[in-house]
């Protein structure tokens, strides 16, 4: 039964809080009525709402299914933050379009064939002592048996490794408790070699297995040469888990189709699903991977197929390192408890969860207490002697997640569309929650680690049906957030996922992640080393060797250098570009029209594109990421000419010839604008220095970026002066215009630095002043009034000192401005600005808040 009294108390508390804000409550009641919201809806919204600029406590890494990607979102907000490109080209990030990411993607080629899609299934986070350390993320590809490694310093894929002996892999990827190995289990049994073998030889030549990949956690790379595969029977191995704590060094992989049935519906035989679920039990594989890792180092103990070292079944059995334990038929997961003592298995066609006890399994192994051997000579342990017990949960139990409460576990019921909360030690069901619909995996907060956090469970549902707006026959998946912090579970949020079929997800505390915000200048982000094409300002150049043209260029707000590149038709063009920005979040993109290439360059990154200039013409290239006010001007031209073609020059466009006096006037005007702009910059610099900007890292970074831009001006000024001396005012005006662009960029960043500094050193706003600033912005006041500046309306700094009974006057003016139009002061303002203050429809409470904000402005007037 649900804890009604607990919910009632929470609702009463919420109601009492809302009652203190009478006007707010009235508005809230109106919204609730219009949208048919209940108090329970309101409470759920409050539990998930994350204000603008706020941060989530947890990050979730979800597989992207058939998209071949991964997805990152926050909890409890359920806001999608990023897609990670893994096995599939991804244009926004340039993944698979620039040369450096292509090298990573091409690591996933199989037998010389390009593979450009994947079916991502089971992600895993690197561990230390069984606890997530926030360093590395791995994901498998079921369709093409591969493992990818993602660096959580920048959320980019750094390595793809192909399993050379498996033909599919559902049971990956799973870290051992110190991330020294990764377990990847085969799915559909097949021959290890790449030859044809008739299906009639299934038992003799088809095999399953588990590959134990050696992983270097210091550099985040798999070492295939130090890895090995454990040969297993063709039982269709499925999911795995690594032992931890008392069971560290052991691996557990379940299976289905111990019948070894191969179907044949096309020749009149019963379909595969009928024959592969005839037996009451299948087999849980129990193996000592730590012992087998030592055994695999000796060439006498292995056979090598396609470069993979394979430990045969008889060698594993001979060394007491491979065993079988019966489990309910068609299981779909095996989950080791935080201490490593309990192992939970659920069978899709059984209503029970089976809890095995490691100490019992180990005692049977040590005593060599077997009930027999399978057809391949692998010892079988007694199921009853291995079990701690079973508990009936419901229809279609699948996957499990642990909580921070001792003995507490959560299991998904696919058929019943429910989550079950139960105790695996006491074998007792505690609660059930309906989900929508047909849940597969669950994601707990670090729920598969040695340190589960509890708090939330996410139900990864396969069907959405009526949960969202209809967008056609292909519906989104549905991830539902469930609060498990109380005695009973509460469904909080539905999140549509329109990216393939996300299969499994893992969650980690955000505090464990420490991603970078910029790269060291000239970094190849795929290797972490300096890029061979690193180019700094002043080093830009175009080099030709035969028919290969290499461009060393830079990108910075708001230009690409060089801006014109001319090549011959048939040339191979290589373009190395470096993002010279040091400001956070100043990404640049790059493409050449018509050439199917793209780069995403984060601050400090160098990347490369390569293509053949095989069509004649003029092709603009430009920055694809809107990066500044002059973004559209951030472009250039690739000009491709045919060396075998004679070109007749077109008549030059006739342009109006300016007189010398007109040129001089234009030059003087341009210089005057630059001088005025420079005066603004100097005033900002003065403010920043006087208020010790260098004490604040964020502001210091912006100032450094601004000064980088300002430092370019002297060179342009020298060129302008030389042009004037030579009497070429046309050229001088162009250089002065370039100076203006550098000044605009400098001022843009400098003013951002000033605004950031003001917020850091100003007195703290009261809650009412914060509401007032929000009302000021949302009410449209900022359209005419800029604090600290005269804009299309007067500066409001000091407005409360300009009138008698100022607060009363300002309030009246905002609420009913038309009543004041004939007052001499207001009439003078109207005539000066040629604009009347409109009625913005403010209410009295908003005006009170705005007055408190204006008081805060006056208190900090010296900063604006």
Image (spheres, rainbow, N blue to C red):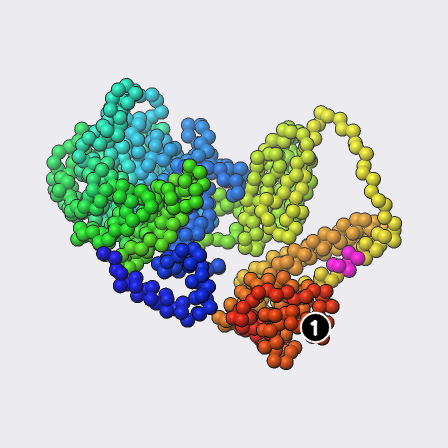
Q: Main secondary structure of the magenta part?
A: helix
In reply to whether residue 672 is colored magenta, the answer given is yes
Q: Label 1: which residue?
A: 822
Give percent across and percent down for residue 420. Answer: 25, 49
Instruction: Give the answer, above or below, for where 744 lies relative to 796.
Output: above
393 w.r.t. 50: above or below: above
Residue sitting nearer the eye, 566 or 851 = 851
Total numbered labels: 1
The answer to if 621 sits in the magenta stretch is: no
Residue drawn at 27 percent across, 22 percent down: 264
Viewer-closest of 244 and 203: 203
Viewed as shown, does residue 235 lie left or right of 16? left
Q: Quadrant of the C terminus?
A: bottom right
Boundaries of the magenta span: 669-674
Is 764 on the left or on the right of 124, as rendered? Answer: right
Residue 91 visible in rendering: yes
Q: Up-down: is 47 above or below 544? A: below
Dot 1 lies on which element?
A: loop
Q: Position of residue 429 (x, y in %)?
A: 20, 51
Residue visible at 38% across and 52% down in the picture: 493
Residue 462, image x and y in percent? 35, 41
Tell me, yes or no, if residue 339 can be seen here.
no
Taking depth in this image into account, of 495 and 571 the one nearest to the observer is: 495
Badge 1, how many Cα within 10 Å: few under 14, some, many 20+? few
Query: In percent of the image, x 36 and y 49: which residue is there?
Result: 480
Give the residue drawn at x 61%, y 80%. 805
Image quarter of the N terminus? bottom left
């Amino acid at each position: 039964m649900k804890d009604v009294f607990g919910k009632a108390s929470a609702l009463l508390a919420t109601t009492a809080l809302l009652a203190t804000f009478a006007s707010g409550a009235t508005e809230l009641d109106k919204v609730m009525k219009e949208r048919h919201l209940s108090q329970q809806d309101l409470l759920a919204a409050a539990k998930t709402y994350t204000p603008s600029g706020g941060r989530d406590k947890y990050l979730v890494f979800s597989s992207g299914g058939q998209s071949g990607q991964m997805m990152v979102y926050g909890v409890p907000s359920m806001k999608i933050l990023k897609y990670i490109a893994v096995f599939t080209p991804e244009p926004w990030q340039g993944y698979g379009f620039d040369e450096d990411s292509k090298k990573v993607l091409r690591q996933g080629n199989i037998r010389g064939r390009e593979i450009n899609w994947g079916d991502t299934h089971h992600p895993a986070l690197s561990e230390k002592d069984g606890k997530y350390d926030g360093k590395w993320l791995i994901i498998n590809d079921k369709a093409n048996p591969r493992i990818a490694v993602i660096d959580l310093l920048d959320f980019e894929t750094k390595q793809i490794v192909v399993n050379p002996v498996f033909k599919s892999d559902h049971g990956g990827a799973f870290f051992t408790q110190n991330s020294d190995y990764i377990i990847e289990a085969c799915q559909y049994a097949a021959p290890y070699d790449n030859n044809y073998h008739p299906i009639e030889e299934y038992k003799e030549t088809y095999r399953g297995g588990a590959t134990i990949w050696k992983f270097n956690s210091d550099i985040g790379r798999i070492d295939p040469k130090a890895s090995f595969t454990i040969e297993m029977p063709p039982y269709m191995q499925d999911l795995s888990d690594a032992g931890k704590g008392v069971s560290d060094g052991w691996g557990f992989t379940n299976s289905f189709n111990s019948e070894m049935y191969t179907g044949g519906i096309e020749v009149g035989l019963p379909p595969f699903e009928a024959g592969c679920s005839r037996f009451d039990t299948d087999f849980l594989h129990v193996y000592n991977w730590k012992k087998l890792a030592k055994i695999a180092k000796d060439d006498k103990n292995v056979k090598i197929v396609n470069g993979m070292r394979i430990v045969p079944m008889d060698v594993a059995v001979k060394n007491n390192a491979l065993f079988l334990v019966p489990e309910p038929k068609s299981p779909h997961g095996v989950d080791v408890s935080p201490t490593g003592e309990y192992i939970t298995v659920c069978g899709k066609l059984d209503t029970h969860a089976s809890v095995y006890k490691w100490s019992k399994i180990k005692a049977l192994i040590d005593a060599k207490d077997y009930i027999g051997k399978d057809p391949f000579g692998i010892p079988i342990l007694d199921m009853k002697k291995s079990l701690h017990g079973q508990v009936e949960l419901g229809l279609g139990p699948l996957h499990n997640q642990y909580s921070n409460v001792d003995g507490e576990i959560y299991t998904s019921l696919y058929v019943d569309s429910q989550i079950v909360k139960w105790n695996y030690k006491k074998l007792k069901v505690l609660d059930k929650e309906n989900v929508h619909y047909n849940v597969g995996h669950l994601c707990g907060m670090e729920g598969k680690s040695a340190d589960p956090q509890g708090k939330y469970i996410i139900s990864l549902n396969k069907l959405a049906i009526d949960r969202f707006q209809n967008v056609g026959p292909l519906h989104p998946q549905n991830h539902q957030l469930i609060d498990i912090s109380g005695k009973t579970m509460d469904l909080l949020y539905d999140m549509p996922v329109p990216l393939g079929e996300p299969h499994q997800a893992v969650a980690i505390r955000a505090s464990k992640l420490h991603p970078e915000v910029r790269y060291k200048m000239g970094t190849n982000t795929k290797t972490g080393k300096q890029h061979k094409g690193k180019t700094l300002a002043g080093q830009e150049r175009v080099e030709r060797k035969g028919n290969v043209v290499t461009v060393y260029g830079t990108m910075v707000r708001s230009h690409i250098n060089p801006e014109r590149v001319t090549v011959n038709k048939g040339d191979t063009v290589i373009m190395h570009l470096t993002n010279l920005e040091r400001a956070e979040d100043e990404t640049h993109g790059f493409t050449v029209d018509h050439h199917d290439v793209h780069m995403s360059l984060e601050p400090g990154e160098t990347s490369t594109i390569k293509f053949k200039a095989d069509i004649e013409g003029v092709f603009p290239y430009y920055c694809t990421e809107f990066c500044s006010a002059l973004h559209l001007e951030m472009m250039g031209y690739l000009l491709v000419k045919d060396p075998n073609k004679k070109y007749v020059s077109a008549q030059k466009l006739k342009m109006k010839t300016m007189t010398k006096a007109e040129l001089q006037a234009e030059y003087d005007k341009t210089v005057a604008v630059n001088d005025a702009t420079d005066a603004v910059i100097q005033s900002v610099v003065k403010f920043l220095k006087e208020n010790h900007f260098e004490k604040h890292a964020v502001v210091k970074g912006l100032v450094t970026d601004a000064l980088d831009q300002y430092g370019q001006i002297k060179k342009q000024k020298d060129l302008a002066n030389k042009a004037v001396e030579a009497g070429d005012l046309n050229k001088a005006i162009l250089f002065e215009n370039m100076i203006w662009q550098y000044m605009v960029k400098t001022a843009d960043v400098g003013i951002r630095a000033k605004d950031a500094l003001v917020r850091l050193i100003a007195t703290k706003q009261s809650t009412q002043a914060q509401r007032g600033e929000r009302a000021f912005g949302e009410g449209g006041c900022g359209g005419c009034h800029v604090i600290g500046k005269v804009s299309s309306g007067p500066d409001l700094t000091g407005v409360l000192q300009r009138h008698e009974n100022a607060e009363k006057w300002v309030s009246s003016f905002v609420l009913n401005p038309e009543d004041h139009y004939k007052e001499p002061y207001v009439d003078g303002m109207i005539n000066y600005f040629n604009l009347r203050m409109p009625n913005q429809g403010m209410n009295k409470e908003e005006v009170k808040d705005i007055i408190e904000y204006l008081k805060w402005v006056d208190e900090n007037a010296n900063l604006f």
